[in-house]
Amino acid sequence: MERANATASNLTLRSHAKRGVSKGGNQHRVRGPPFETHRYAMLLRVRLGAVAGSCEVRRLCYGLCMSNGLDILSPARREIVRDAIVAAFGAAPIGAVTPLHGGATGAAPLCVEVGGRRYLVRVEGEASPLRNPHQYLSLRIAAEAGIAPRVHYIDEQARVAVTDFIEQQPVQAYPGGPLGLAQALGELLRRLQDTPVFPHFVDYPVIVGRLFAHVRRTGLFAAGVLDAHTERLDRVSAAYDAGVTRLVSSHNDFIPADILFDGRRLWAIDWESAYRNDPLVDVATALDTQTRTPELEEALLRAWLGRAPDDAMRARLDLTRALTRLYYAGVLLSASAAASGALADTDLSAPTLPELQQAIRDGRLVRRTPATRHVLGKMFLASFLSGTLPPGFDAAI
């Protein structure tokens, strides 16, 4: 390790900032069309190899990182991370590499120390038929607006991004308490929806329907058990489509795990689902997962809209909340099906939130397990049918 560090300090490389990366506003931006970032990355790797000789920089980075946490990754992902670090930071000394929890998407996020600072390197999981092709352009737009952390490097083909690492503080310490946090969430949504609009991917009822159809095909539930949900989805989707007026930049997964507090302000992270959508989708998700009282709901809505919503908007918000609840039921139950297979479950009974929390405290359910996600998915299914508040995610995810 000492020899490797000495080699790193003696290497002289031309800064990648002079090779096609410019500083502007609040982040580093790759020049050229948004979807050509991967070509820049490949050219940069060739140049680095030519300067250092026989890809010495890549081998050096490999040696430094392997002893700091990359060994948990597959060989292909290690290569992607290694190339991203070299492209973003050249021969800067690399310190600790710490794996982070990647959530339900299969992503591999890493906290990487480079030159005495910490950065996030995020490699996405296996591509799915529902994969959003616009996540990196959306991330760049959000970062330029100061909503997402500053971007240092993106390779769209390898599906990896390097950004600033947000040193997270408990949201319970947010100035003004829950009311101040609700207002800040509404303001963050307003700022996001004022950005240059993200590309279009798919209409929201369509992706909800596809995900729910996938759950039905898995055999996780017995035939006929989910028929009432299918019928309600058809009715909600028809009414929802009739009221679409405008689309805006949307995060589309505005849950507590994706909103970080750094001690001063909020940041939104994990932009793999971001594309152009109904402005109420992010609002509905925030209301169901981050504001748990009518007072806090109203505070968020007023901060977002600048006024109290009228009756027509509230009615449409009810439709949107139904769709977001079924969407998250689909996410949770897809994870359950992937782990458990065709259970042919005939029981849709779901606990209340206090009952779920007690089961976790008693050890009858364990956080972040397929069994707990299965129960939580049933709770979202019940909320979709009844219109009552869903459980949120803090208790089990």
Image (tube, grey):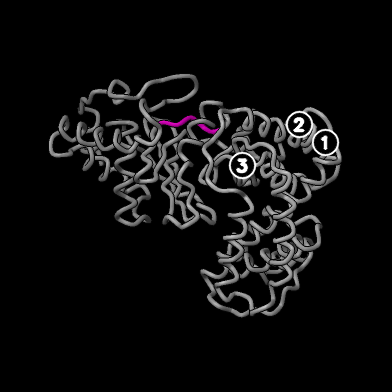
Seen at 47% across and 56% down, the residue is 106
Q: Quadrant of residue 211?
A: bottom right
Residue 131 in view: yes
Residue 10 picture location, percent across and down: 20, 27
User: Can you give x and y, in whole percent of width and height, for residue 99 in the image?
Assistant: 44, 49
Q: Residue at label 3?
A: 277
Q: Is residue 289 visible?
A: no
Using residue 96 as the reference point, say whether residue 102 is left or right of it: right
Q: How far apart are marks 1 and 3 (CA)?
A: 19 Å
Q: Residue 280 carries which label?
A: none
In the rendered image, the vertical position of residue 315 relative to residue 149, given as above or below: below
Q: Secondary structure under badge 2?
A: helix
Residue of label 1: 309
Marker count (numbered): 3
Is residue 272 inside the magenta stretch? Answer: no
| Label pair 2/1, CB-CB below 8 angstroms | yes
Q: Which residue lies furthest to the left in this view?
A: 53
Which residue corresponds to the image point at 55% horizontal and 42% vertical from the top-left? 274
Residue in front for this viewpoint, 339 or 227: 227
The residues colored magenta run 148-152
Determine which residue is flagged by label 2.
305
Q: Distance between the residues labelled 2 and 3?
A: 16 Å
Q: Is mark 3 on a helix, strand or loop?
A: strand
Q: Does the magenta stretch include residue 151?
A: yes
Q: Nearer the viewer, residue 50 or 111?
A: 50
Which callout, 2 or 3, points to the residue nearer the camera?
Answer: 3
User: Residue at 72% of width from left, 47% of height from top?
Assistant: 242
Amino acid, disc 2: Leu
- In the image, taking residue 62 as reference, residue 98 lies left or right, namely right
Task: Say whether marks 1 and 3 touch (CB < 8 Å).
Answer: no
Q: Position of residue 205 (x, y in %)?
A: 64, 53
